[in-house]
Amino acid sequence: MKLTTCIIDDDLVSQFATRYCIQQSPGDFDIITCSSGEEGLKSCLDFAEEHNRLPDIIFLDLVMDGMNGWDFLENFQNMFHDHPLPSIYVLSAFTNTSDRTIAKRHQLIAGYVDKPLSRAYLQKILVEEEKKRTVS
């Protein structure tokens, strides 16, 4: 089954590295890339309207100009409270240790990843997604 992933990151190098990691992994993916939290919300809204569901996985940077990752999560939860929510993985350099602590406890965050996304961690995510699909 094809998975839709959404990368929300204002760092184009990180965005490229995450996209490349996903493209190099076994599996069939549609990849949406967004350079801001605002663009991420709009892309998710457009995707939901077109496909009647949200992307399967979101990779979210926390530190972005404009709407940061925390603001994105709050708006996302408010906008899509009536939809099954995707797995959201924070993709960050975690220079702020309090961000890591908050991310571990946040109800919408399935996991956190130190940049760059590694093949091993992506494989772990894909195994978890497969388990979710077989249970549903």
Image: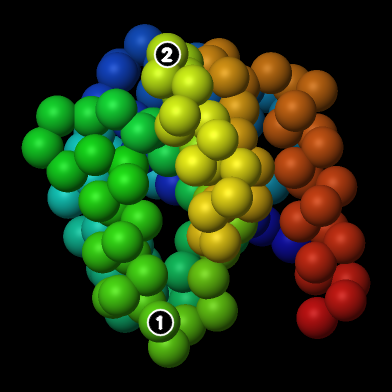
Instruction: List the residue tagged with mark 1.
Output: 81
Q: Is residue 53 left or right of residue 29?
A: left
Query: Quick one: label 1, few (<14), some, or many (20+) residues within 10 Å?
Result: few
For residue 95, the mark is 2
Give the SS element for disc 2: loop
Task: Depth check: give the residue in front, 62 or 136.
Answer: 62
In the image, residue 98 sits, relative to residue 37, either above or below, namely above
Q: Residue 31 location, x and y as percent?
A: 48, 43
Q: Which residue corresponds to the image point at 87% horizontal and 62% vertical from the top-left?
A: 131
| Residue 89 as seen in the image, left or right of residue 51 | right
Q: Disc 1 or 2, which lies upstream in sequence?
A: 1
- The image quadrant that residue 79 belongs to is bottom left
**Quarter the C terminus occupies:** bottom right
Dot 2, how many residues are within 10 Å of its Cα: few (below 14), some (14-19), or many (20+)?
few
Residue 1, given in percent of the width and then of the height, sits at 74, 61
Eye-nearest disc, 1 or 2: 2
Location of residue 133 in the rendering, given as x and y in whole percent from the top left corner: 80, 69
Q: Nearer the viewer, residue 19 or 124?
A: 124
At mark 1, the secondary structure is loop
Relative to residue 48, is residue 103 drawn left or right?
Answer: right
Residue found 37% across the figure and 77% down from its top:
80
How far apart marks 1 and 2 lie (CA) works out to: 30 Å
Of the residues shown, which amino acid type is indicated by label 2?
Answer: Thr
Left or right placement of residue 94 versus residue 110 in this view: left
Give above or below for 45 relative to 92. Answer: below
Q: Residue at x 36, y 34 (%)?
A: 62
Q: Amino acid at mark 1?
A: His
Quarter assignment of residue 23: top right
Instruction: Residue at 55% x, 35% y: name it.
Output: 101
